[in-house]
Amino acid sequence: MISDYLIIGAGIAGLSAASRLRQISSTAQIVLINGEDRLPYKRTKLSKMLYCGWSKEELAIYPATWYSDNRIQVIAGHKMISIDPQSLSVTLDDGSTWAGKKILLALGSEPLGIAGNLSFREAQPAEAFLQGLKHDTPLSILGNGVLAIELAEQAALLGKAVTLYARQDLPMRGEFNLRLSRQLAALLVEHKIKTMPLTQAPKQQLMACIGTRARALSLLPDLSDGKGGLAVSKYLETRYAQVWAAGDGTVVDGSSPCHLWHQAEAQGWCAANNMASLSPLEKLAYLDLAYRLKLEVFGQYYFSMNYHASLDCACLERNVGPVYQAIYHRNNRVEGLLMSGDKERNKDYEKAVREKWPLAEFVSRLS
């Protein structure tokens, strides 16, 4: 059988696309290829829950009945091993072949291949990693971005000695200014997490949290943007007719690779609209809005939104009690934000950037 829509990958981009396609059409045949051994889940929680652990279905986004109620056929536990973009068919590791009139690639990213390293991008490797934490051996982590720091915190809470090996001395320099990076670095030191130069990293048994490439490129290298991302048009189309791509690692029209949960969710929604469109006039260009990044470790909360895109703006830094704010503004309107210590109002900070609040309104409302 050839389905109307074949979605490869059951992360948030693939799931968002499946949901949107069903909203658009009550009769379309939708097949979702899920290479994992459980229902699609909130994978960003894996690195936040090592200390308390999780059950197999605990992180599921929807219950099993949601898929049956929406008539979405889920092929679980088998990964794609080949794809023919001309015939719009794929082969899974059980030897089965699936075809669709239209295909969405939503496979996400994978860590750059470094021999002997571990991965933390799926639940089963994460569970194996959790078992390994029970052994009394130090933990070495490559990187000092969000994933690396969340893993370091959880491992430290479990009593492990942790060392981060990174290119930069200070953590999160891609998303934080110097002040917040230094504040976070001091927090890591306080909890006995070391940071060492990347050049001094051991050769084996590292948790790799540095450098990724779009997973689909292992089978379709000609879709590369040249930097490890999967290149698509502003309509999320690949170079192959009737093949779209969305989610982590996707590079839209030469922009930066998708790497945030809500960004991937929006791409899946947009791709679904364009897959279902009946004419070019109905296609929607993907609008890459600003999305917030949050980090919560050792009881401290950090927030970053549209930081890099706002570096040419004026910046107002201020402390409101224990709360730190760096407000990037242009023509007296908010363009980007950094914040620590104000988790309860994070949705207000997000709205401030999205809606470009006047600076005076921000100061009045978030003091």
Image: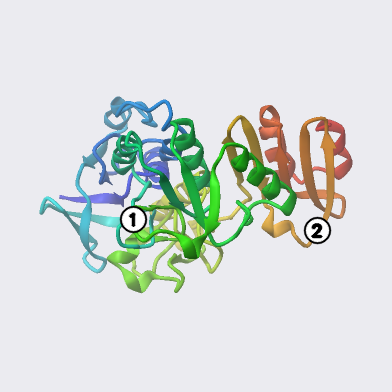
Dot 2 falls on a residue whose secondary structure is loop
In the rendered structure, which disc, 2 or 1, sits on the residue that comes first in sequence? Answer: 1
Tell which of 259 and 143 is nearer to you.
Answer: 143
Residue occupying the far left of the picture: 95
The image position of residue 141, as x and y in percent, is: 44, 50
The image position of residue 208, as x and y in percent, is: 41, 54
Across the whole image, how many numbered discs are drawn on residues?
A: 2
**Quadrant hosting residue 123:** top left
Residue beneath the point at 35% across and 53% down: 107
Name which residue type carries label 2.
Answer: Cys
Dot 1 alpha-carbon crowd within 10 angstroms: few under 14, some 14 to 19, many 20 or more: some
Tell which of 70 and 328 is nearer to you.
Answer: 328
The image position of residue 296, as x and y in percent, is: 58, 35
Q: Label for residue 117?
A: 1
Q: Is residue 131 left or right of residue 145?
A: left
Label 2, label 1: how far apart the Cα atoms are: 40 Å
Q: Nearer the viewer, mark 2 or mark 1?
A: 1
Q: Is residue 283 above or below residue 316?
A: below
To which residue does mark 2 refer?
A: 313
Q: Is residue 354 left or right of residue 250?
A: right
The image position of residue 63, as x and y in percent, is: 33, 26
Dot 1 falls on a residue whose secondary structure is loop
Q: Is residue 273 in view from this perspective?
A: no
Residue beneath the point at 45% across and 71% down: 225
Q: Label for residue 170?
A: none
Name which residue type carries label 1.
Answer: Asn
Quadrant of the snapshot with the C terminus? top right
Q: Is residue 65 above or below residue 249?
A: above
Q: Is residue 275 above or below residue 346?
A: below
Q: Is residue 131 in view from this perspective?
A: yes
Q: Is residue 104 above or below residue 127?
A: below
**Quadrant hosting residue 76:** top left
